Image (cartoon, grey):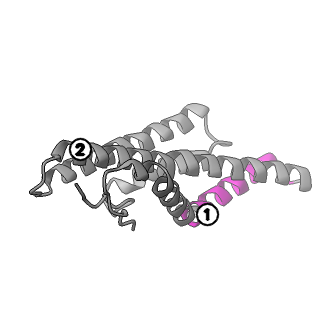
Amino acid sequence: MSYELPCWRQSTTQKPKGYANEVGEAFRSMVPKAVVWLSYGVSSSYVLADAIDKGKKAGEVPSPEAGRGTRVTLAVVDTFVWQSLASVAIPGFTINRLCAASLYVLGSMTRWPLTVRKWTTTTLGLLAIPVIVHPIDRSVDFLLDSSLRKLYPSVGKPSSS
């Protein structure tokens, strides 16, 4: 059995929700922790919705072969794992550490007021989001191609966008 895995980070109206946790992390020093955790909830709902959507699309692919259930399961699992890593876990960690480090460095090396340091850190975190997306996406593709996807029965390389 063979099929093409769904493509990732497609242009949809839901896509901005996938970046919510990165924005939440950028604002972590300025908002209550509950807001940051809510941003992870929004991003996680995007991941779940995308996995379900890719599963539905995989089920609609006409195929002379049996194995529709396997095709749907692989699409859901692959999308869920990929999106969880590439849209939530890795970017959230990256922005969190970047902002924490910048806040520390600004506190150590400047005499700027705390409010200015926090806004500078937040701005840096927001500016980093578009810079980190492509390298993280490619890294997660490589990681999954080197591990989980080797377990799939005869699956083609995903068409990432």
Which quadrant of the rendered structure holds the N terminus?
Answer: bottom left
For disc 1, the neighbor class at 10 Å (few under 14, some 14 to 19, many from 20) is few
Tell me which amino acid carries mark 1.
Leu
Front residue of 112/89: it is 89
- Left or right: where does residue 19 sit relative to residue 103? left
Q: Which mark is residue 25?
A: none
| SS for dot 1 | helix
Q: Is residue 116 magenta?
A: yes
Mark closest to the chain's N terminus, 1 or 2:
2
Instruction: Please state which of the two labelled residues, at mark 1 or mark 2, is closer to the viewer.
Output: 2
Considering the whole magenta stretch, tell me its main secondary structure.
Answer: helix
Tell me which amino acid carries mark 2.
Thr
Q: Is residue 12 magenta?
A: no
Front residue of 35/69: it is 69
| SS for dot 2 | helix
Residue underneath mark 2: 70
